[in-house]
Image (cartoon, grey):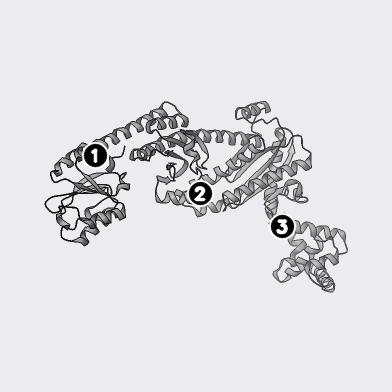
Amino acid sequence: MNLTVEAILKSEFMEGARLLAGISALEKEIKYVDIIEVPDVIDWINEGGFYLTTGYSFKDDLQSQKELVQTLSAKNSAALCIKKGRYFSEIPEIIVKTANELNYPIIELPKDKSYVDILLPLSSMLLDKKTYLLKHSEKIHQDLTDVVLSGGGLDHLAQTLYKLINKSVLIQDREQKKLVFVGDKEDVLKHEVYIPEAKLKKMLLKDNINLIKSEKQSRLMTPVKVSGSILGYVSIFTGENSDIEKIDYRALQHAATVIALEMLKEKEKTEVEKRLKVDLFNDLIQQNYNSEEIIINRALNLNWDLEKNYLVIVFEIDDFESYYRNLEASQEYQIKDIQDKIKRIIKRRLLQEHKDLIVINKSSSFIVFYNCEGLDQEKRKEKSRAFAEKIAAEIKKEIASTKLFAGFGGHYQGLDGIRKSYHQARQAIEMGKKINKESNLFHYDDLGIFKVLVKLDNRECLNEFNKEMLGPLLKEENSDLLKTIEALLNSFNNKREAARKLNIHRNTLDYRIKKIAKLLDVDLQNSENWLNLYLAFKVKQML
């Protein structure tokens, strides 16, 4: 318990003392006791000081008397005790008046009360309190450590902390979602548990432990950290009839340390599971297994049912390498935070749609096995696209600086089908980003001729073909002619439509067509030449 002015006034050694001012400030905590009898004492005053004086240093100066009270109040000291007798027969009115204006406690001591009568018992009480705090702090630390060492989880830790400090305990993950709550639910209901991210960051920059007060209660909150990365938060709450005490700060510090150990254990388990999933996925995609039965059983151990039919969606963070380039080595955990947050968003959406939770994170990619059984092709495409759009929207909302691409493969049967769908989803992203810069969602079915072109590995051959077909038009001075032939191809050689798209006169278009035919030395009446030009433009988009 805190040692307050009110508690001291009720003590036997303060018999005969009289409170003259500051009746509403008796809850002030006393942290130490001292005597002030010399001039220029202002620099010695500190928070929580309980000061004794005869008034010698300010007995003849009304302004000094007023300034002393103002300083004592400004520095949040506990109280000033003035002894009647040698210098004051009555406590000066200016002191009492100023103290009442500032709601600062002034206590009158009787003539026969010596300093020793107060100093000895009060110092003893303060020492006892420090000893109690130290012992209680050690007990809290030991009890919480014992819980972790005995294999107790977050539930057990929260229960133990609740019993030790008799205050409600809330443990949250880094998204501020409740993991464990122990205590009076009313404590939490009276308080806004979620704190907006920007506000929380600002709070944590200022203090590691934050006291958040409302009319009906107080909340003490601190992050749970490991190597600079926030894993979650732990808070304690008071009701209307209690307040945050000094021991609560120490308890919260101890709790954050042991909760970090427990969360780290859980994180390591998750990392092991993640590695197992990535290994399984790699073996599946690379056909690194002797029998389908073995890999299906390995998957079942990870709660994956590979005997269902899946459509594979690949989500990819745009320009992921730039994140690393722009971050210092000590900030690399921020990349991990982004990856974890994206994975949680995807899993949350899968749960909302009652889908299988098969999500694999490989560097900048997130691979989802999306179950569309029972739907026709059109519905599968519609549902999977809607799912990806919601994911992209949530990520844009929660991680504003991150853009996500999504590629969709087809829906096939068996392990070969999963493998095929994955490669298609990858190709959809790779080609989609080149041929449709306005979109971030690409379906393999929509690639058209690019499905064939993407299988041509010889880029040198493709470059040669491109130059052979479009050569002179690729020069900067002929950019208008290049746009003209492209408009004609996209308008199926409809000259009126092409002229409209280019916003030029039909005669200008005819002139350009003749110039193109001459530069390329081709007959534009020949359908095979048009096909070659069409393919050349598609190759140009690819390269």
For the C terminus, give its image quadrant.
bottom right
Does residue 372 appear in this view?
yes
The residue pinned by badge 1 equals 126
The structure residue drawn at horizontal position 82% and vertical position 61%, both measured from the top left corner, is 491
Between the residue at mark 1 and the residue at mark 3, the CA separation in whole angstroms equals: 79 Å
Label 1–label 3 contact, CB within 8 A: no
Looking at the image, is mark 2 or mark 3 earlier in the sequence? 2
- Give the image location of residue 424, x and y in percent: 71, 44
Between the residue at mark 2 and the residue at mark 1, the CA separation in whole angstroms equals: 40 Å
The residue pinned by badge 2 equals 197
User: Dot 1, crowdedness within 10 Å: few (<14), some or many (≥20)?
Assistant: some
Q: Nearer the viewer, residue 503 or 141?
A: 141
Does residue 68 appear in this view?
no
- Give the image location of residue 116, x and y in percent: 14, 42
The structure residue drawn at horizontal position 79% and vertical position 64%, both measured from the top left corner, is 487
- Numbered circle sitting on residue 92: none
For the N terminus, give its image quadrant.
top left
Label 2–label 1 contact, CB within 8 A: no
Looking at the image, is mark 1 or mark 3 earlier in the sequence? 1
Q: Nearer the viewer, residue 370 or 444?
A: 370
Query: At label 1, which amino acid type do we have?
Result: Leu
363 above or below 180?
below
* Left or right for 280, reference 114: right
97 above or below 276?
below
Q: Secondary structure at mark 2?
A: helix
Q: Nearer the viewer, residue 397 or 29?
A: 29
Q: Nearer the viewer, mark 2 or mark 3?
A: 2
Query: At label 3, which amino acid type do we have?
Result: Gln
- Numbered circle sitting on residue 541: 3
Label 2–label 3 contact, CB within 8 A: no
